[in-house]
Amino acid sequence: MNEAISVLQAHKSERSYTDEAVSDADLATIVEAGRRGPTSINGQQVSVVVVRDAERRAKIAEIAGGQPWIAKAPVFLAVLIDFHKTAVALRMAGREQVIHESVEGTIVGSIDPGIALGAMMTAARALGLGTVPIGGIRRDPDAMVALLGLPPMTFPVVGMCVGHVAEPAERKPRLPLPAFRFDERYDEAALEPAIAEYDVELAEHWKKIGRADGLPWSANLAGIYDKVYFPHVKGCAAKQGFKNDK
Amino acid sequence: MNEAISVLQAHKSERSYTDEAVSDADLATIVEAGRRGPTSINGQQVSVVVVRDAERRAKIAEIAGGQPWIAKAPVFLAVLIDFHKTAVALRMAGREQVIHESVEGTIVGSIDPGIALGAMMTAARALGLGTVPIGGIRRDPDAMVALLGLPPMTFPVVGMCVGHVAEPAERKPRLPLPAFRFDERYDEAALEPAIAEYDVELAEHWKKIGRADGLPWSANLAGIYDKVYFPHVKGCAAKQGFKNDK
């Protein structure tokens, strides 16, 4: 199997890092992978803030609800929806931007950071480094806006740690293929058996890695998705100009 | 440079395909790269519908506003926000899902398909195939919902063509690094010079590939982002349960 494929299929999140720095060259390579990714209509409405300052990383660890690996890993990459950059371009061309006020804007604004994040994670892992994506910055997005000095029409949507791995994680199993891949049309009937199978498989995974508090997948989701678990996203997004009213 | 890195940094969109089929093995490898990617809280709220049927692809080409490469490439992968799957899991655990009604749900729901799409594009290119991401399915998402038989709480958010490349495209330049990478804090002052430089660079690219209608970046965006260019997204998303009111 070729190397790019094996890096992709071996994805796992690492949360244990050594103190070793990430070199400027590796960091540049990682960020470049993000910059080179495709974006909708080549709009490039995505930016990355590289955070290496230890105090700032400690603050992000706290914002994310207490995730010590953010303070420990030497680099944190904050990925932004950036319709500010495009608004500047529109102004230079004598127009006012509207797209960021729409649901379409929020959707496309979030897809492109996902593509960039994925490329940067893959690049980091291809360089032998470890990464973990961090959605927890959306727990208090206003604090991220203040910390990174973010202008209107940007939103800190996701992040990732990068560093040298201390104790490698075990790869977590995924839902069986019939609950991910459909052929030609969606197949409702595939879901329940796949979920039931996965509940058992994930429970075995928790047992194997000694996580006594690990729940089956459906029970775990039930305690998270029965509410808006990051309730400040809507308000902060609206304040930043993402009104979602169009 | 290692192979995964060079695949990532060499990304380009291909729109010219031969009639050669994509093998089942290659297709399985591509989809597996998507399935193995990370998702927020391991929620796995993303699914892929593999479309090989020629009539269906022709219909998607039309939905996307007339993109003949969708009809020509032998495989189209539609990537879904899939909070239906998670709602089934919640119901199995005796709970009702709320997350999909929130802006947080739309954001996280869109990031994860971006990650999956990126991984599948990278895998396809590592296998020597060509790909182009397709946001145009959001031009008429209701038609995609009908065509793929999508249940509530799913949304056809992005897609991609996969096939063997006939005439390779030229790699398109990106905004200069200072308008993509910021260190520690956002830097407003970097934007205008970078955009002005890129406007020139992109105009040269259009000239080089003989696209007489190619506009500078800012002028091109000005004609797209001054409105909601896919105006049916909000309504279709709401119909599917993505109310964005929380």
Image: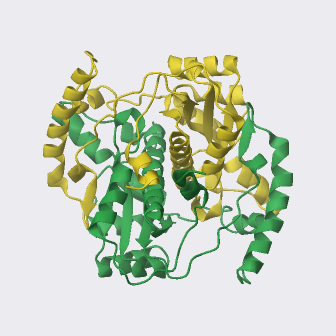
Chain colours: A yellow, B green
Instruction: Relative to A3, say whether B107 is above or below.
Output: above
Instruction: Pinpoint residue A238: horizontal percent, then vertical percent.
Output: 60, 39
Instruction: Relative to B234, say whether B147 is above or below.
Output: below
Toward the viewer: B176 or A140? B176
Along the horizontal axis of the image, is A234 left or right of A210? Answer: right
Instruction: Pinpoint residue A80: horizontal percent, then vertical percent.
Output: 62, 41
Along the horizontal axis of the image, is A62 left or right of B241? Answer: right
Instruction: Relative to A120, say whether B221 is above or below.
Output: below
Q: In the image, what residue occupies the spot 85% across and 43% down?
A: B189
Instruction: Look at the image and tell me whether residue A20 can be seen.
Output: yes
Toward the viewer: A70 or A195? A70
Q: Quadrant of residue B187?
A: top right
Instruction: Pinpoint residue A73: horizontal percent, then vertical percent.
Output: 58, 24
Q: In the image, what residue occupies the spot 83% across and 45% down?
A: B190
Q: In the image, what residue occupies the spot 44% across and 46% down?
A: A7
Instruction: Pinpoint residue B129: horizontal percent, then vertical percent.
Output: 45, 69
